[in-house]
Image (tube, rainbow, N blue to C red):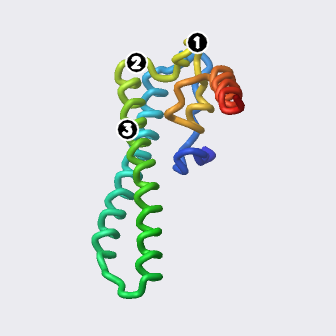
Amino acid sequence: MAQAQSKSTGATFTPYEPAPSEEYMSPAQLAHFKKILEDWKQELMEEVDRTVQHMQDENVVYSDPNDRASLETDMTLELRTRDRERKLIRKINETLDLIAKGDYGYCEMCGVEIGLRRLEARPTATLCIDCKTLQEKREKQMAGE
């Protein structure tokens, strides 16, 4: 079977091919997305651990002001990246809760199916493509005011 790579997670997985009579968000589909999310979360957690180790290893005091400034800039960028990843881990946990409750895969605005391919591309999606497009248009309008 062909492999695919999620644009948001970067993870490689086998795209889910539902049986012709299979209902949307069947137990097999839920297990598929749960595995994608858990693998992604594990990858992010390992990256956080590497950052902590890296920051402990880089606990060096440079006498040259340029070296200190460069190190501080690198650390600031690293911390900003990790902060985004922490937020993403929280979103993954929220999505795993939706799976556990049986609410995963449906648009939180209109209630329609989000779709398997969209969820494979962005497993934490909570809006169907139409509602997401509408939300983005509203955000652009608000930013232009």
Residue 73 is left or right of residue 109, and the answer is left
Query: Considering only vertical position in the picture, is 32 above or below 130?
Result: below
- Residue 2 numbered mark, or none: none
Residue 52 is left or right of residue 116, and the answer is left
Q: Residue at x 40, y 58 (%)?
A: 79
Residue 99 position within the rendered picture, expressed as x and y whole percent measured from the top left:
40, 25
Answer yes or no: do the residues labelled 1 and 3 have beta carbons within 8 Å?
no
In the rendered structure, which disc, 1 or 3, sits on the residue that comes first in sequence? Answer: 3
Q: Residue at x 28, y 70 (%)?
A: 56
Q: Which residue is mark 2?
A: 102
Q: Nearer the viewer, residue 78 or 42?
A: 78
Disc 1 versus disc 3: distance between alpha carbons? 24 Å
Disc 3 versus disc 2: distance between alpha carbons? 19 Å
In the rendered structure, which disc, 2 or 1, sits on the residue that comes first in sequence? Answer: 2
Q: Say what amino acid the circle numbered 2 marks.
A: Gly
Disc 2 versus disc 1: distance between alpha carbons? 17 Å
Residue 69 position within the rendered picture, expressed as x and y whole percent measured from the top left:
45, 75
Q: Say what amino acid the circle numbered 1 marks.
A: Cys
Of badges 2 and 1, the one in the foreground is 1
Q: Nearer the viewer, residue 108 or 123?
A: 108
Q: Which residue is mark 3?
A: 90
Please, what secondary structure does the residue beneath circle 2 have? loop
